Image: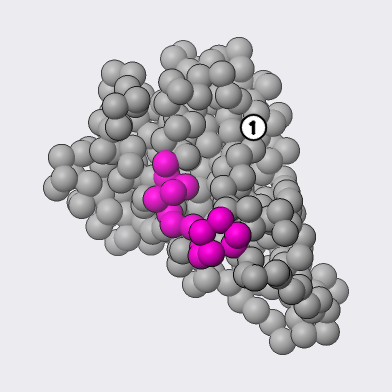
């Protein structure tokens, strides 16, 4: 892309980098000369993506990391610093849908798992990245969702939607606090995207008692009449780490083909 100019030898961390949006973003950034560390709870997946990037002329490493575990997050960030000596870009992308259940049936354990994996992990990644970004600035992007921010019709997703709304609030607080260090913080809010997040989605039988039918006029994705692709979100991520977005911070950007406007 002619409009993109990487500043020197930039380094990025992408969580959930073994598949879907994380993998697409890693490929996109690496193609622009950015060194990429992919973190994922499934080490084999990030190793495979890193190998692919390296074979195509980029620079990437893969690290196993449970993003809800503070010790593992700190270790992963330290590996990046030891390997490349700097950190410029953070994409907090890891997340799960978790258990879908009525509030009265959702267990505290399942609630905590979703909040920990989605929201607490964002805090941990940002918190421990800041000391390595303060001197030269950079860009932090948080993968939130239309759920909890503009859409509330997905019954049973109280934990997920709460985690996604919390990410946006955290993003705004972080953007203001970190502006003095020239660290920009933004959030992308995708709608339906073709990923494998369904593997981390657990529907319960109890949902039937609280379901509310939602009928859409002529489909629920007005722009392209299909879910988005991970590469489309990756394009937005690339924009938000580039100089083209140098005056954008504290902003949530919806990328859903008008799905959430219905």
Horizontal arrangement in the rendering, residue 111 relative to residue 69 (left or right): right
> Total label count?
1
Q: Where is residue 214 shown, x and y percent of the image?
A: 76, 73
Name the residue rendered at 38%, 34% in the picture. Answer: 12
Please tell me whether residue 239 is drawn above or below residue 42 in the rendered image.
above
The residue indicated by pointer 1 is 251
Q: Is residue 183 magenta?
A: no
Horizontal arrangement in the rendering, residue 255 relative to residue 112 (left or right): left
Q: Is the magenta stretch mostly helix, strand or loop?
A: loop
Name the residue rendered at 22%, 38% in the picture. Answer: 59
Name the residue rendered at 72%, 87% in the picture. Answer: 205
Q: Where is residue 133 shown, x and y percent of the image?
A: 47, 22
Quadrant occupied by the N terminus = top left
Q: Quadrant of residue 152?
A: bottom right
Res 176 seen here = yes
Q: Compare residues 79 and 232 and report the one nearer the observer.
A: 232
Res 70 seen here = no
Please tell me whether residue 59 is drawn above or below residue 96 in the rendered image.
above
Name the residue rendered at 25%, 49% in the picture. Answer: 50
Please tell me whether residue 29 is drawn above or below residue 53 in the rendered image.
above
Quadrant occupied by the C terminus = bottom right
Q: How crowded is mark 1: few (under 14 residues within 10 Å), some or many (20 or more)?
A: some
Q: Which colour scheme is used?
A: one colour
Q: Where is residue 101 shown, x and y percent of the image?
A: 74, 75
Q: Where is residue 67 shown, x and y percent of the image?
A: 51, 50
Magenta residues, start to end? 221-235
Please tell me whether residue 179 is drawn above or below residue 240 in the rendered image.
above
Horizontal arrangement in the rendering, residue 55 relative to residue 73 (left or right): left
Q: Compare residues 171 and 107 and report the one nearer the observer.
A: 171
Which type of secondary structure does the marked residue at label 1 adopt?
loop
Q: In which quarter of the image is residue 111?
A: bottom right
């Amino acid at each position: 892309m002619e409009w993109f100019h990487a500043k020197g030898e930039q380094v990025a961390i992408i969580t959930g980098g073994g598949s879907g949006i994380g993998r697409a973003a890693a490929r996109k950034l690496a193609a622009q000369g950015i060194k990429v560390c992919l973190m994922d709870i499934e080490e084999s997946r990030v190793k495979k993506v890193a190998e692919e990037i390296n074979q195509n002329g980029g620079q990437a490493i893969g690290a196993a990391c449970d993003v809800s575990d503070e010790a593992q997050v700190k270790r992963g960030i330290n590996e990046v610093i030891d390997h490349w000596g700097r950190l410029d870009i953070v994409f907090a992308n890891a997340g799960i849908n978790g258990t879908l259940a009525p509030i009265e049936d959702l267990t505290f354990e399942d609630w905590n798992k979703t909040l920990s994996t989605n929201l607490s992990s964002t805090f941990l990644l940002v918190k421990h990245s800041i000391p390595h970004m303060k001197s030269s600035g950079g860009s932090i992007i948080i993968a939130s969702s239309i759920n909890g921010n503009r859409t509330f019709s997905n019954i049973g997703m109280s934990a997920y939607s709460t985690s996604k709304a919390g990410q946006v609030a955290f993003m705004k607080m972080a953007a203001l606090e970190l502006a003095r260090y020239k660290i920009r913080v933004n959030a992308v809010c995708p709608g339906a995207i073709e990923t494998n997040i369904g593997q981390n989605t657990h529907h319960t039988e109890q949902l039937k008692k609280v379901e509310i039918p939602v009928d859409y006029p002529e489909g629920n994705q007005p722009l392209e009449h299909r879910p988005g692709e991970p590469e489309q979100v990756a394009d937005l991520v690339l924009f938000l780490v580039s100089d083209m977005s140098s005056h954008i911070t504290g902003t949530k950007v919806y990328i859903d083909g008008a799905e959430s406007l219905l």
